[in-house]
Structures are given as structure tokens and as C-alpha cells.
Amino acid sequence: MTTGPDVSARPKDYRLLVPREWFRIDLVQDRWRKQLKTFVDLQAEGKNCPAEVKQEAWAGLRNTAESAVANGALEFFLRPELHDGSIMPVSLVVSLIPRPGAPTPGDLLALFEEREHRSGRGAEVSIVALPAGEAVRIRSRTTLDLYVHMPGTAGYLALGFVVPVTGVTGPMERLCTSIAESLRWIM
């Protein structure tokens, strides 16, 4: 008789499949600023981008990365997307929210529903079943956040997608969902 993985054990790591053309920045390493600059330079290359557009893109992405690092982010993925001469990439931030004895997905759902109700943003909040486990899903026009409950009551792994140009609908929603569904725990 075969048994599945021990869901009471904490995972050692995770695996997430992200399309090859997405640019990965390792936020755990100190070299992330250089990696971010490389991304901006590659996007502007051969596109007649003014220096101020490059600087604005760099500053915005740097601020996002710095905030993400301060909040436990591990990885930052960027998918090139140009709009009206601006560099506005689709992004995914993967963050670890370690919380021994973390709230259940149902409790987290109630917390986020209350927060969304107070904010008036109109985001949809729900629980979804992913192969890696239950997740709280928060979807607005341009964002999709998934808080995946980790085995062993270790906390949550957060996947935060931002799709500034086309929004989180249609093909982009399916792509973001497919990435989230690829999450696997390494036990």
C-alpha cells in the first residue's frame, strides 16, 4: 500500500514552474539590484526607450523588490510587457509567511473578506484547492494573490501576481492559475 507525503511534516523547499521567458530575480541574494537593472536594460534595448522611462521602470521595480524583501519575499519573476513606450512587466512575487500554528485557510478567508469589505476595492476572495493544498485567493482587476497553506502548519507561501496592462482576465488569468497549480512541496 502506497501512502502520500506526510502532511504533518514541514516542507524543505518548494518547486514552481514559471514560463522560460519570465525573468527570475533571486531576492535572497544581495545581487538582486544588478539582476533588476539587467532586466530593465534588456527590455529597453533596441526599443528607443528614453532614459527617463528606463529610470522610472528601474525605480518602480526596485521599490517593489525592496518592499517584497522586507516582507519575506524569496523570488521576483518579471514577464516583459511594453505599453505605450513604457516598461510595465507582469510580475510574480513569491513570499514565505512563516507562522507556526498559522490560521486555517477558512480563518484567513474570513480575515481577508473583512479587509476587502472595509476597503471597498471589490476584490473577489475565495478558497481554492491547489495540488499543493488549500489556498486563499484574492483577485482584483490587475492582481491575483494566492496564500497557499503549507504542510506542517509552517505558515503560508504567498504568490502575488500583478498584471498592469491587460489585467487578470482571460489568458493571463489562466497563465497565473497554471503557475499556481504547478506549486509542489519538497518534503
Image: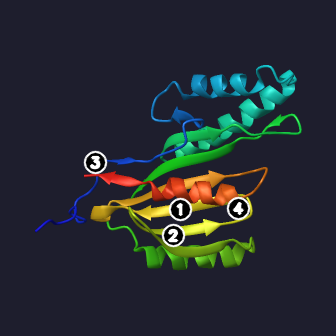
* Callout 3 touching callout 1 (CB < 8 Å): no
The label nearer to you, 4 versus 2, is: 4
For the residues labelled 2 and 3, the Cα–Cα distance comes to: 22 Å
Circle 1: residue type:
Leu
Horizontally, residue 91 falls left or right of residue 179, namely right
Question: Are the residues flagged by discs 1 and 2 in contact, CB closer than 8 Å?
Answer: yes
**Quarter where residue 149 is shown:** bottom left
- Is residue 71 shown to the viewer in this render? no
> Tag 3: Cα neighbours inside 10 Å, few (<14), some, or many (≥20)?
few
Q: Position of residue 84 (x, y in %)?
A: 89, 39
Is there any visible trace of residue 152 in the rendered image?
yes
Q: Residue 170 bears which disc, if any?
A: 4
Circle 2 residues within 10 Å: few <14, some 14–19, many ≥20: many
Q: Do the residues labelled 1 and 4 touch (CB within 8 Å)?
A: no
- Kindly identify which residue carries mark 1: 146
Q: Which of marks 3 and 4 is in front?
A: 4
As measured in the structure, the alpha-carbon distance from the residue carrying label 1 to the one carrying label 2 is 6 Å
Count of all numbered marks drawn on residues in the image? 4
Q: Which mark is residue 136?
A: 2
Position of 29 with respect to 139 (left or right) is left
Q: Name the residue under label 3.
A: 12
- In the displayed structure, 103 sits above or below 183; it is below
How many C-alpha atoms fall within 10 Å of the one at disc 1: few (<14), some, or many (≥20)?
Answer: many
Badge 4, how many Cα within 10 Å: few under 14, some, many 20+?
Answer: few
